[in-house]
Amino acid sequence: MKKIFICLGIFVCAFSFLSTSAHAIKWDDGRLTVDYSIDVYHEQVYGNVSRSSLDVHKETKGNWHYNEELRVKLDQKVMDNLNLDFFFYGRNTTDKELSNRRWKLLQMYLRLYGEEYEFAVGDVSEYYSKYTFRNTFLGAKAWYRPIPEFRIMALGGRNREGHLDTFEHSFGSVRMEFTPTPNYFLGATWVHTEVTKMFPETLVTDYSNNVWAVDTKLRFLDRKLLIRSEGALSYYEEDRNDYLRDEVQGWAVWARADYRPIRKLKMTFEYERVDPMFFTVMGTGSPDRETFKGMVRYNPSRQWKVWGKYRLYRNALLSKSPTNYRTNTFYSELGTTYRPFYKDDIYFKYLKLDLKLDHTHRMSEDHPNFPKTTDYETYRLKLMASNRYKNMRYSLEYRLRYVDDHRPDEPDTINNTIRANWKYNFNALDFGWALGLGAGFDFKKSYEKVPTKRTYFDTTTILHAGLGVNYEPSKTSLKAYYNASITNREQGDDTRRHSIDVGIEQVIYESDLLKSTVGVSYKNVDYWSHDYSDKYGENIYMFNYTLHF
């Protein structure tokens, strides 16, 4: 408790100082933005405390916490063709649900850039190509464009360290891009990655992996045809410390064509095959898969859109695949969107009608004399009508889902779902109002085949409501939300979940340079079940302060 009061005193003093101080945070060649927030809250659990994820004492079922966060963003023009971008984001908290560390640096980077170059260090992200690198990391990246048609890029770093890490993942990469004309693009990338275990008992080995890739982007037929492709090779060394082991080689290829013969029609075809022995880099897709995709989209008018999709996906491509048997997935979809009153300036001008039908069939190719491990079909239908008029929005939606499971020991299911939502913003009695209501009903019917045929039902009712009130003269706002989910089961326990969230926020000080806000809120979550051991509830009482300048 003493720490909490100390924190309260510190930020109250800081508020008093900053609220009466005028600082120039904008200037001709730069800008500084600072966001600070602190939440002080008491969490309380009743009922089965093990069902809650809140960080509370098991004996008292309650605990005090605070969470401070600071963001600093600096943009500065240093000189001609040299700009600086700095960002800092840190957190200080006692809540182990948010972080196992009291203090944690969430993100920080420094970036220097101009028209022909960029250099960044810290927590950065990069996207090279589909099979090489696309992730965030801790390290440095840079690119340089000596001539307009050519760019060279490089990066190096490691994964962000976590408290549960048992190994270190480091990597480096170089990429070159060549664009001789706006219609032709060629890229080449090399990525080297290594994993080093941090403890002897770590299960992973000290492996290394090299990936070479070439990607293209080409436009033909007066830019009506766009072809994108990539091919990659990987050389994987399972254990760098064992020189007797051979490298494992694998390959991957991807191609996509987008053709627009007329403005209203677009056709897309895509193919991908990733060899089981192709080892990917951190952030890229998994190996051992083959995919065929096709899509046609036709827009005869601004009122009407029609589309169709087809996709075939399969894994376990070769006998050396890690999976014992192949699973084929076939997916097809038809959909349309229609706006009947688009050209008329009436109440239903923005009325939109959506229809979508899709079918999925997943089937495994294991032993032919036994029931398949996976063999089911899913049929789905979606009907939706939505409209907006001035400050009012509303929608009505119906969904049908039928699962036809061909395995004798698995039930078939039918779900019928209805959803309705309504939102309205208006001004009345010198207040700004925001109202929202919603309701839904889901009816699930299951058919069991063995040991005897029987049918049972599940029903779920969903309700939610929201109210927002804003009084602009005093800059006071009030928000309240209610959500409920009630499930009744013929086979299993009935459950009910209710949540209430109420809060008020007050702007204490606001000017062109600074804004400070305080708020208090209360949240309750109550979960009820026929199984007494599953019953629990949560109460959170929170005080919040934010500062922005």
Image: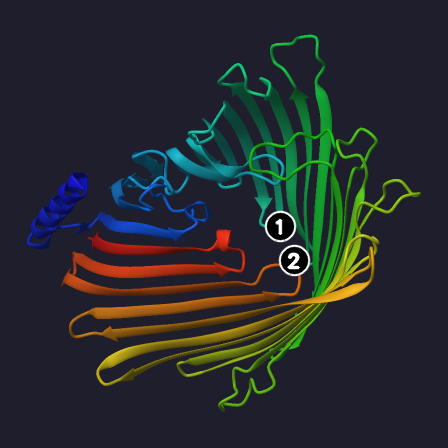
Mark 1 sits on what residue?
183
Q: Is residue 522 above or below residue 68?
A: below
x%, y% of residue 238? Answer: 65, 19
Residue 511 appears in the figure: no
For the N terminus, give its image quadrant.
top left
Looking at the rendered structure, which numbered label has been put on residue 422? none
Judge from the rendering whether residue 418 lies leftward or rightward of residue 371; answer left or right. left
Assess whether mark 1 and mark 2 are in contact (beta carbons under 8 angstroms): yes
Judge from the rendering whether residue 449 lies leftward or rightward of residue 439; answer left or right. right
Q: Is residue 134 above or below residue 508?
A: above
Kind of residue at disc 2: Arg
x%, y% of residue 60? Answer: 31, 44
Q: Is residue 350 above or below residue 70?
A: below
Residue 349 appears in the figure: yes
The 10 Å Cα crowd at callout 2, few under 14, some 14 to 19, many 20 or more, is few
In the rendered image, which quarter is residue 317 located in? top right
Looking at the rendered structure, which numbered label has been put on residue 223? 2
Residue at 44% x, 67% y is 483
In the rendered image, which quarter is residue 506 located in? bottom left
Residue at 82% x, 62% y is 453
Residue toward you, 31 or 184: 31
x%, y% of residue 3? Answer: 18, 39
As measured in the structure, the alpha-carbon distance from the residue carrying label 2 to the one carrying label 1 is: 8 Å
